[in-house]
Amino acid sequence: MKKLHSAWIIILIFLMFSFPVYAGVPLETVKVNVNIVLDILSNPKLKAESAKEVKKGKLRVIYKEMFDEVEFSKRTLTRNWNKFNPAQRAEFIKLFEQILEKSYADKILDYTNEKVEFYKESMLSNTQAEVQTKIITSSKEIPIFYRMILKDGKWKVYDVVVENVSLIQNYRTQFNDILAKNTPEQLLETLRKKVSKQ
């Protein structure tokens, strides 16, 4: 009996010391920010249609905190990033953010108390990590992976992979196709028109 009790103590100590490896800073960072988003979405005071813009405004603040917009844009444009001058880069980052918000805000606002599970953190290097989560609905599980980078002491998201589809890769293909035949200014004009129609 004493031997069995000692075994449980060893297991407990192992779990205590191994837990930070499983739930390190990247995972906790995603968890905190996603839970804030869920609190906003489930807030009964923001359920009315008239509160939609207020809700979007609150989500925008979380986006700014959670995502590294520069890294997001650089990795999307890859080698084409160097074709943009500083002013063009700044405008691209702003326009890209607006396009993403329009594309995904309504989907996020459709949230109806689905469960989110945070279950794995993988360190890809000392400064990069992937946090694996999934949304559990009544009919299926949707895997969502957050790819993160450590900058200035903070972990920020630079890509989101939903059901094995990378957000960066999706837009990279579109933008590379445009830039293969057009200038950065022409891509920006295309994005300006897209944003103005939203």
Image (cartoon, rainbow, N blue to C red):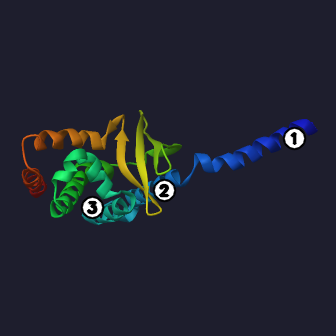
Please name the amino acid that badge 3 sits on.
Lys
Disc sitting over residue 29 in the figure: 2
Quadrant of the frame with the N terminus: top right
Q: Residues within 10 Å of mark 3 (few under 14, many from 20)?
A: some
Is residue 147 shown left or right of residue 98? right
Q: Residues within 10 Å of mark 1 (few under 14, many from 20)?
A: few
Q: What residue sits right under mark 1 in the picture?
A: 5
**Considering depth in this image, is 35 or 70 the residue closer to the camera?**
70
Mark 2 lies on a secondary structure that is: helix
Q: Residue at x 24, y 51 (%)?
A: 100
Q: Residue at x 17, y 41 (%)?
A: 176
Q: Residues within 10 Å of mark 2 (few under 14, many from 20)?
A: some
Please name the amino acid that badge 2 sits on.
Thr
Q: Earlier in the sequence, mark 3 or mark 1?
A: 1
Q: Earlier in the sequence, mark 1 or mark 2?
A: 1
Q: Position of residue 99 (x, y in %)?
A: 20, 53
Q: CA distance from mark 1 to mark 2?
A: 36 Å
Please name the amino acid that badge 1 sits on.
His
Mark 1 lies on a secondary structure that is: helix
Q: Viewer-nearest of labels 3 and 1?
A: 1
Q: What residue sits right under mark 3 in the picture?
A: 52
Q: Residue at x 70, y 49 (%)?
A: 17
